[in-house]
Image (cartoon, rainbow, N blue to C red):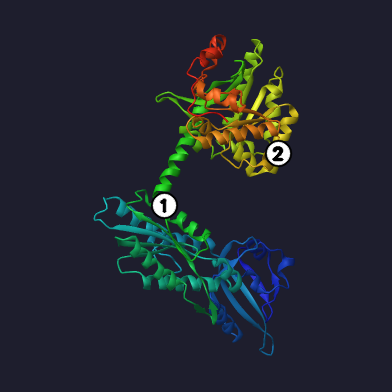
Amino acid sequence: MDAAAIFSETDLKGTITYVNEQFCQVSGYSREELLGANHRILNSGHHPRSYFIEMWRTIAAGEVWKGQVCNRAKDGSLYWVDSTIVPMVDDEGKIYRYASIRFNITEKQHLLERLRAKVGRDELTGLPNRARLTEYFNQIIAEPYKGSSQMAICMLDLDDFKSVNDRYGHAVGDQLITEVAARLKMVTRAGDVVSRIGGDEFVLILNGVSQTSDLQRSLQRVLTTVGSPYVIEDKPIGITASIGVTLYPSDNVSADTLVRHADQAMYQAKQRGGNRVQLFDVLHEQETRASHQTVARVQEALRNGELLLHYQPKVNLRNGHILGFEALLRWHHPELGMIPPGEFLPVVEQSDLIVDIGNWVLDEALSQLAIWQAQGHNWTMAVNIAARHFQRDDFAEVVRTKLQQHETLRPENLDLEILESVAIDNIQHANRNLDACRQMGVKLSLDDFGTGYSSLSYLKRLPAQTIKIDQTFVRGILTDSNDQALVEAIIRLAVAFHRDVIAEGVESWAQARTLMLLGCDLAQGYGIARPMSAEAVPSWAASFNIRNFSQQPRELPFSIA
């Protein structure tokens, strides 16, 4: 016998009684796993049930059956065999077993599939396949799209199709796919294209779309048609579909990207519960792409040393004492010059890059603080911590490591500023990190206080030593009685809970004097000093005199109660 032959024997019920070594090698099962098992163990689900009914009818009648069979190996992979099954008879002419000889033709089958793909037709449904669809797209996109109407590229995917295969088998699943393809052809127009690109995924190309409302109605008809009940092999089957749509040339991208955009919209339709149509948001995609580009450029800026820190002083308004500085991020773009953080940080804060930047800022700020300390200044250094950075489980340990790398620094000279809303969003996690930092001796401040929850219970539970009054309230303290009342309330809260309080955004002595009358002596803002480079700090500190600031007019627009 040919060494490549796959040989087996079964009893009349299909129970395997003998296999050769080649059978084991091709199927992936051991001889012990196969002997005594039914031959259905190899069923791939590729063939309809009628295929095997005809095979058994032939061999039960004592005739030889020949055909090609797709089997499923133990690891789930498919393989094809050219099979001949011979009924074995005893001396009385009765069939007592079946002998089968097979030859592995998987490579041949794959070659045929590749040839069919080149022809451009899906083997199961006869619809244009992915290769043919790409050719069609490329032909359209090669020339400017004419007319005012658009072309709709629709990705249709059956909802929970896997459960059909799991419950009824792959043969029924294949018949369902075939029926869906027929219905799609029936419900679309002659000039439209219906393509199957694999599995239970179809692409529809609808031409001449002038109104989105008309498109929605057309696709709703598609969903209704596909979602109507099926009966396959006497089994009632219900299925729905989700459709994602993008419009060309509004979405003016490559053929592959058009399909990907339709696929993204389809996934959103599934997330919303399925059995619906979702239109791709081109504007959102453009914004997302721009965000990715910004993050990539800022990452490059971090690598190239384009990021730097400026420092804004914090002072005691009453005695003019310099408390320390807040480290503020800047981007010195080689072509655009100095870029303020508001133009790039909001996007970066949505990515993990903000963690790398946050760690870099900590290093830079602590290094600068060490330099000032060596010069005899006992200043504090405030560093803003982004939400994504602060919420990491290893945040406190990172702070500890940074302080150990600057062993000459006193931990209490580091002040971590956390947005009030960030601390409260996950207060248990926040408290763990805040407690760990406080135990090291690090100071903690709640930034932009008053813009978030500002609850008494939250303030009681958060172990922050300092409350920062948001500059929006400070800005209106002279002209808006509500802002003045809010500032006064925050100051009283701070006193009641034994917290320090500092106002940010102080621009005039009138604001400063009002704050002092209300009980807040600590402040920062442009009226005191703008953020400056590290090199500029020593000369500014040497020349700073609170009296120069206090020479501004003292008149207030209303009295302080």
User: Percent from the top left, x then y, of residue 537?
Assistant: 55, 14
From the image, tell me which residue sits under label 2: 460
Separation of residues labelled 2 and 1 (CA atoms): 44 Å
Pick whichever, 504 or 165, lies toward us.
Answer: 504
From the image, tell me which residue sits under label 1: 281
Image point 51% across, 16% down: which residue? 549
Query: Could one spot residue 126 in this view of the protein?
Result: no
Name the quadrant containing residue 560. top right
Q: Is 222 situated above or below 291? A: below
Image point 66% across, 24% down: which residue? 414
User: Percent from the top left, x then y, of residue 124?
Assistant: 46, 69
Q: Is 420 situated above or below 157? A: above
Q: Secondary structure at mark 2?
A: helix
Q: Is residue 35 left or right of residue 483?
A: right
User: Percent from the top left, x then y, of residue 282?
Assistant: 39, 50
Pick whichever, 50 or 12, lies toward us.
Answer: 50
Under mark 2, the amino acid is Lys
| Residue situated furthest bottom in the rendering | 92
Pick whichever, 29 or 202, lies toward us.
Answer: 202
Image point 25% across, 56% down: which residue? 148
Under mark 1, the amino acid is Asp
Task: Identify the image quadrant of the C terminus.
Answer: top right
Residue density around tag 1, few if under 14, some if 14–19, many if 20 or more, within 10 Å? some
Name the quadrant containing residue 428. top right
